[in-house]
Image (spheres, rainbow, N blue to C red):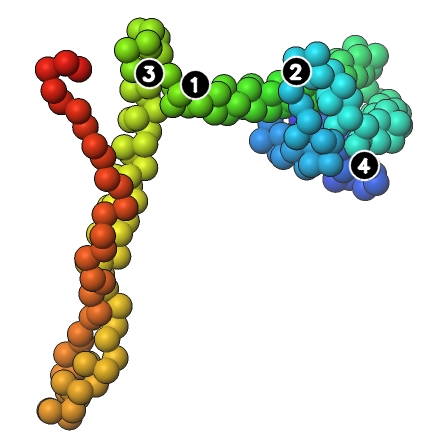
Amino acid sequence: MKDMLDQLLDEEGLELDELTELLMRGEGSQMEMAIRSGGQNAGLERLMYFLQVGFFSRRIADNFDWSAIEGDLERIMKALEQRGLDPGQLARIRNYLELRLEAFKRMIRQHVERELERRAYRQGEKLTREVLADKPLFALTPDEISQMKNVVARLARKIKDALALRQRQEHKGRLDSRRTTRKSLQYGGIPMEIFLKRRHREKPKLITICDVSDSVR
């Protein structure tokens, strides 16, 4: 069916709305990109509650010209009818196009729901860190201890990644043009001996104080 519609568009040269062509020819990833683009000015930064999902879904949907799309679909059906397709074929194609249109509308709502989940997760993480930071260790519940371990593990990964990056940069070094030129002048610069600038060891950026006495074990 998709091949038939592609052939129709190529042969008839119909001027269609961009979204209409996307509905007929586009893949899911392309439709998602169109929704993201439509949501850039929808004010999703104010999305905080599930009851707002419908409102922001409509705001994104309002960025698309649905009347033009409906008109395009009618023109497509008329062109197919003129090609002599029987009523059964026309009904199946119309159903296919309507399903694609409904799927796109569902994708808009799903996009808003995912954005709400992402924002809620980030806000929850922030709240968890703030609560754990102000609470004595002896007062932590088993669940909070597990959350604390996750926070510490993420912090450790950040420190490890930053250290690994710094060590790679130190290993590579930067060209020391003055030493390289001075050394190469001794034998006409052939072959040239390359000297690199090494970064000096930096002072620790993180200092931890750990109480390992018997009273806290």
Q: Are marks 2 and 1 in contact (CB under 8 Å)?
A: no
Q: Which element is circle 2 on?
A: loop
Label 3 to label 1: alpha-carbon separation: 10 Å
- The residue lying at 14 percent from left, 79 percent from top is 193
Q: Nearer the viewer, mark 4 or mark 1?
A: 1
- Comes first in the chain, label 4 or label 1: 4
Considering only order in the chain, which callout, 2 or 3, is on the residue closer to the N terminus? 2
Asked whether, in this view, residue 7 is left or right of residue 216, the answer is: right
Q: Which residue is mark 2?
A: 49
Residue drawn 65% across the image and 33% down it: 36
Which residue is the site of mark 3? Answer: 136
Residue 102 in view (yes/no):
no
Give the class, few, some or many, for how many residues have Cα within 10 Å of label 4's Cα (few <14, many ≥20).
some
N-terminal of the pair, mark 2 or mark 1, is 2
Amino acid on which the number 4 mark rests in the picture? Asp
- Residue 189 against residue 214 in the figure, above or below: below
Q: Quadrant of residue 179?
A: bottom left
